[in-house]
């Protein structure tokens, strides 16, 4: 269990392109039209699965959005085109649905957090 969490955290670190020189600089993710359009191609049950999986990795206490997104990568087995940007949009959707609250700039996953309402 601990080994898998460590692997997830390392993967997130590498995906965000952080290095020792720029570690304090937030890396903002930009959403594209294709990111938004991806969700329009999914059915209601698929959208519900994505929402419930992302939500299941949140907690009543603050958690880094990068951790929530990293743990939600398990969905890639079912949704091959689902990447960190689309999962971040899933987090944003849950915030807009008042299921989560956030602090910080959610486009900078390592520098923002969410928790359940």
Image: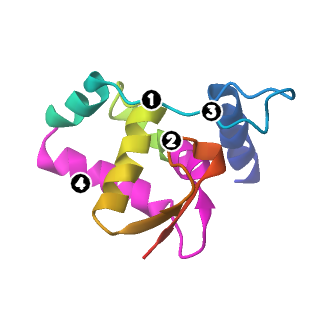
Give the number of the disc on residue 30: 1
- Which quadrant would residue 89 be assigned to in this image? top left
Contact? badges 2 and 1 (CB < 8 Å): yes
The CA span between labels 2 and 4 is 22 Å
The CA span between labels 2 and 1 is 7 Å
- Label the magenta part by its dominant secondary structure: helix
Which callout, 4 or 1, points at the residue further toward the start of the chain?
1
Q: Secondary structure at mark 3?
A: loop
Which callout, 2 or 1, points at the residue further toward the start of the chain?
1
Which circle, 4 or 3, is nearer the viewer?
3
Which callout, 3 or 2, points at the residue further toward the start of the chain?
3
**Residue receiving disc 2:** 107
Decide: few, some or many residues near mark 1? Use Cα within 10 Å; few <14, some 14-19, many ≥20: few
Which callout, 4 or 3, points at the residue further toward the start of the chain?
3
The CA span between labels 4 and 3 is 28 Å
Asked whether residue 53 is drawn in magenta, I would say yes
The CA span between labels 4 and 1 is 24 Å
**Residue receiving disc 3:** 27
Quadrant where the C terminus sits is: bottom left
Contact? badges 1 and 3 (CB < 8 Å): no
Instruction: Residue at 65%, 45% (x, y): give it.
Output: 110
**In the figure, 65 relative to 11: above or below?**
below
**Residue receiving disc 4:** 48
Q: Nearer the viewer, residue 74 or 83?
A: 83
The CA span between labels 3 and 2 is 8 Å
Which circle, 2 or 4, is nearer the viewer?
2
- What residue span does the magenta drawing correspond to? 42-71
């Amino acid at each position: 269990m601990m080994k898998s969490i460590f692997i997830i955290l390392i993967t997130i670190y590498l995906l965000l392109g952080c290095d020792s020189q720029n570690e304090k600089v937030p890396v903002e993710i930009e959403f594209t039209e294709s990111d938004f359009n991806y969700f329009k191609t999914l059915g209601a049950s698929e959208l519900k699965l994505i929402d419930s999986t992302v939500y299941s990795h949140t907690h009543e206490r603050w958690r880094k959005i990068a951790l929530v997104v990293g743990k939600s990568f398990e969905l890639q087995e079912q949704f091959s085109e689902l990447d960190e940007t689309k999962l971040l949009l899933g987090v944003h959707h849950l915030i807009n649905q008042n299921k989560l609250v956030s602090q910080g700039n959610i486009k900078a996953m390592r520098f923002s957090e969410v928790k359940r309402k």
